[in-house]
Amino acid sequence: MRIILLGPPGAGKGTQAVMLSEHLKVAHISTGDILREELKKDSSLAKKARRFVESGGLVPDDIIIEVIKERISGLNDFLLDGFPRTIRQAQALDEALVNSRPIDLAIYLDASTPTIIQRLSGRRICSKCGANYHIKNMPPKAVGFCDKCGSILYQRPDDSEAPIKNRLAVYLKETASLIDYYQKQNKLLRISSDPDAGEVFKELIQALNSKVLK
Ligand code: AP5
């Protein structure tokens, strides 16, 4: 399948994407993860993208569209997490797939603002393998260290107060209109992501099965 995960920052896209891509055995492509890897390497992409990522703004469409085209080229199935984020990106994706298969489904993870703030401010990431934790909701076994590889956990610079505010504003201004875009294509599946991650995943699989089997 070719799936898009939509939703505000902190809705749980990355968390669900890891579980869903394993369940469906499809490639998980996260533009946020790709950009953070590039920033670590200080690559030429990082030089163009850093100020946008760190302030919670959007990397310009032309840059990110090229990144995605390259990543999906040759893949039969994929799960896109964090792309598209603007109407222009969605149109570019549709155009890029015109000679192959279109997107099957856009899953919209809907979370309330208090949930989003609580999740983003408590999120911790593994500095080596990128595994995702939350100090209260999904704590690691040893405080400050990754369960999977033992490396130190850190807080994303854009999970501080000013960038969080900016990311929420950018989401409402640029990204929320994609809900309507995919609704009009009859591809939207809306799931509340306020419950805990296991519950959301169960709901997601049930909804996915009934939508696909319909
Ligand atoms: P990106 O990394 O995509 O950030 P985001 O969309 O703001 O999403 P997040 O990663 O913050 O949240 P999430 O929904 O994945 O939640 P998560 O599962 O981690 O992008 C970062 C930046 O890159 C952007 O700001 C932009 O600058 C740039 N960028 C990326 N894509 C771009 C594009 N297409 N165009 C232009 N620029 C782009 O969960 C959050 C926390 O909550 C975690 O701690 C988790 O453990 C916890 N949690 C998750 N689910 C649950 C649950 N159900 N119950 C309890 N806790 C939960």
Image (cartoon, rainbow, N blue to C red):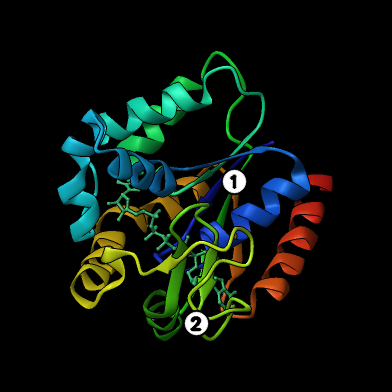
Q: Which mark is residue 186?
A: 1
Counting from the top left corner in percent of width and height, residue 134 is at 51, 77
On whether ligand 1 comes within 8 Å of the CB at mark 1, the answer is no
Front position in the image: 49 or 38: 38
Counting from the top left corner in percent of width and height, residue 2 is at 63, 36
Counting from the top left corner in percent of width and height, residue 44 is at 21, 29
Front position in the image: 143 or 201: 143
Q: Secondary structure at mark 1?
A: loop
Q: Which residue, as the protein is rendered here, is positioned at the far front?
A: 150
Quick one: label 1, few (<14), some, or many (20+) residues within 10 Å? few
Q: Is 214 rendered above or below residue 164?
A: above
Q: Residue 161 lies in what quarter of the image?
A: bottom left
How many numbered dots are placed on residues in this image? 2
Q: Residue 57 lies in what quarter of the image?
A: bottom left
Q: Does residue 48 appear anywhere in the picture?
A: yes
Which quarter of the image is occupied by the N terminus?
top right
Which residue shows up at 22% across the image and 67% down it?
163
Counting from the top left corner in percent of width and height, residue 52 is at 19, 50
Q: Which residue is mark 2?
A: 135
Q: Quadrant of ligand 1?
A: bottom left
Give the side of residue 84 with respect to residue 75, left or right: left
Q: Is 101 rendered above or below residue 151?
A: above
Front position in the image: 78 or 188: 78
Front position in the image: 4 or 147: 147
**Mark 2: which amino acid?**
Ile
Q: Nearer the viewer, mark 2 or mark 1?
A: 2
Quick one: label 2, few (<14), some, or many (20+) residues within 10 Å? some
Whichever of callouts 2 and 1 sits on the residue coming sooner in the sequence is 2
**Mark 1: which amino acid?**
Asn
Which residue shows up at 60% across the image and 53% down it?
17
Q: Is 182 rendered above or below residue 161?
A: above
Q: Which residue, as the protein is rendered here, is positioned at the far top?
A: 99
